[in-house]
């Protein structure tokens, strides 16, 4: 069995070191903050390397939140106050108040920094146009659809810059798709993916990450989005959603979320081995990527690290058993 099977990766976020949170909250000196961001990325990249992750990312140290981070960098957005999203979680909701324009790099600087500090492969997660529009107020465009396509053009410009800089694995995060599964909404999201990947198809490996949704309503349509991989969450629901993939003879690469990021209980290696074996019933080993359900940022750092370490050990065990 080749080493290209069951490759381990992450979805994106990782817990910020406590000292970084302290600096973000207490220090306004841009030089110190920049220095801290860089050191934090060095630390979390090292954590992932030690845990055994083969395709890693910077843990989103610079991103406070997956929508506002982008909205703050795209001209035409403003950030209103915090809105409640679930339980006691709040996020700063952006609003589109003018024509959206590309003003400055969104993530290409993040990629370039990580490229300079690791020899491992890199996956670049970028929030998708559908989610950015859906989680913002639209006070400028005549419809949500129009806003989605305007954002998609900007994301496309960034993805072109990323590929020029050498990025070869881009993951578009579209968690908002989980809550909208009508035909019209899926069609808008599909067209947005088309626009975001215009001119880069074939030059870069692409994935979409979707989590905590009704997969039975998204399938089989999401298989026609024209990306190489769907990255989905399975552990949180006891892997039952694998049946949906089976039903539609899933034949793409799969990012298999097999670590529950909503629980601080660390899975055992045996448990994750069993989960990977369930996925191998549906997807060939060379098409299977192993990762957590979603970003790890809400977990304590040592738990996140341990979960990744266990996941990589399990993937290695299954790989050896297949050889
Ligand atoms: Zn997610």
Image (cartoon, grey):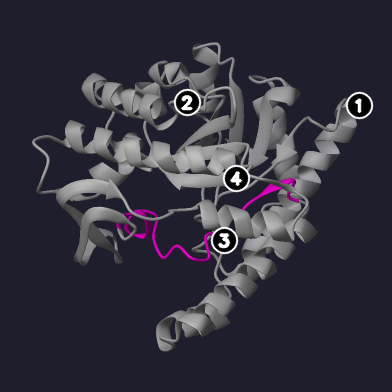
* Badge 4: residue crowd in 10 Å (few <14, some 14–19, many ≥20): some
* Badge 2: residue crowd in 10 Å (few <14, some 14–19, many ≥20): few
Which is nearer the eye, 246 or 211? Answer: 211
Q: CA–CA distance between discs 4 and 2? A: 15 Å
Q: Nearer the viewer, mark 1 or mark 2?
A: 2
Q: Is residue 298 left or right of residue 272?
A: left
Which is nearer the eye, 180 or 202? Answer: 202
Secondary structure beneath label 3: loop
Q: Which residue bears the numbered disc 2?
A: 199
Q: In this view, does 25 lie to the left or right of 123?
A: left
Q: Can residue 293 be seen in this view?
A: no
Q: CA–CA distance between discs 2 and 3? A: 31 Å
Secondary structure beneath label 1: loop
Q: Which residue bears the numbered disc 3?
A: 14
Which is nearer the eye, 39 or 229? Answer: 39
Residue stretch in magenta: 53-71
The percent position of residue 165, horizontal first and vertical second, equals 60, 45
Q: Quadrant of residue 231?
A: top right
First of labels 4, 2 by sequence position: 4
Q: Nearer the viewer, mark 4 or mark 1?
A: 4
Q: Which residue bears the numbered disc 1?
A: 323
Q: Can residue 81 be seen in this view?
A: yes
- Magenta stretch, main secondary structure, is loop
Secondary structure beneath label 4: loop
Q: Which residue bears the numbered disc 4?
A: 165
First of labels 1, 2 by sequence position: 2
Q: Nearer the viewer, mark 1 or mark 3?
A: 3
């Amino acid at each position: 069995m080749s080493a290209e099977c069951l490759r381990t990766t992450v979805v994106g976020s990782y817990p910020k070191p406590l000292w970084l949170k302290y600096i973000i909250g207490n220090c306004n000196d841009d030089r110190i903050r920049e220095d801290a961001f860089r050191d934090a990325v060095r630390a979390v990249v090292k954590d992932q390397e030690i845990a055994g992750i083969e395709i890693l990312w910077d843990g989103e140290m610079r991103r406070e939140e997956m929508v506002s981070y982008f909205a703050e960098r795209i001209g035409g957005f403003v950030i209103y106050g915090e809105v409640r999203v679930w339980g006691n979680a709040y996020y700063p909701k952006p609003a589109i108040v003018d024509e959206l324009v590309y003003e400055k790099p969104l993530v290409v600087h993040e990629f370039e920094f990580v490229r300079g500090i690791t020899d491992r492969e890199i996956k670049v997660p970028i929030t998708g146009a559908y989610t950015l529009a859906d989680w913002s107020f639209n006070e400028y465009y005549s419809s949500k659809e129009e806003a989605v396509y305007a954002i998609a053009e900007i994301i496309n410009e960034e993805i072109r810059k990323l590929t020029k800089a050498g990025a070869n694995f881009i993951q578009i995060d579209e968690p908002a798709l989980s809550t909208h599964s009508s035909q019209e909404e899926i069609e808008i999201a599909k067209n947005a993916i088309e626009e975001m990947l215009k001119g880069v198809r074939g030059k870069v490996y692409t994935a979409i990450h979707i989590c905590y949704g009704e997969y039975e309503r998204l399938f089989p349509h999401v298989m026609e989005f024209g990306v190489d991989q769907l990255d989905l969450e399975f552990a949180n629901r006891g892997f039952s959603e694998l049946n949906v993939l089976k039903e539609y003879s899933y034949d793409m690469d799969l990012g298999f979320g097999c670590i529950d990021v909503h629980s601080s209980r660390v899975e055992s290696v045996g448990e994750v081995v069993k989960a990977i074996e369930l996925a191998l019933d549906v997807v060939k080993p060379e098409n299977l990527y192993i990762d957590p359900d979603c970003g790890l940022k809400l977990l304590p750092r040592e738990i996140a690290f341990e979960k990744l370490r266990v996941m990589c050990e399990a993937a290695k065990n299954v790989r050896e058993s297949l050889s």
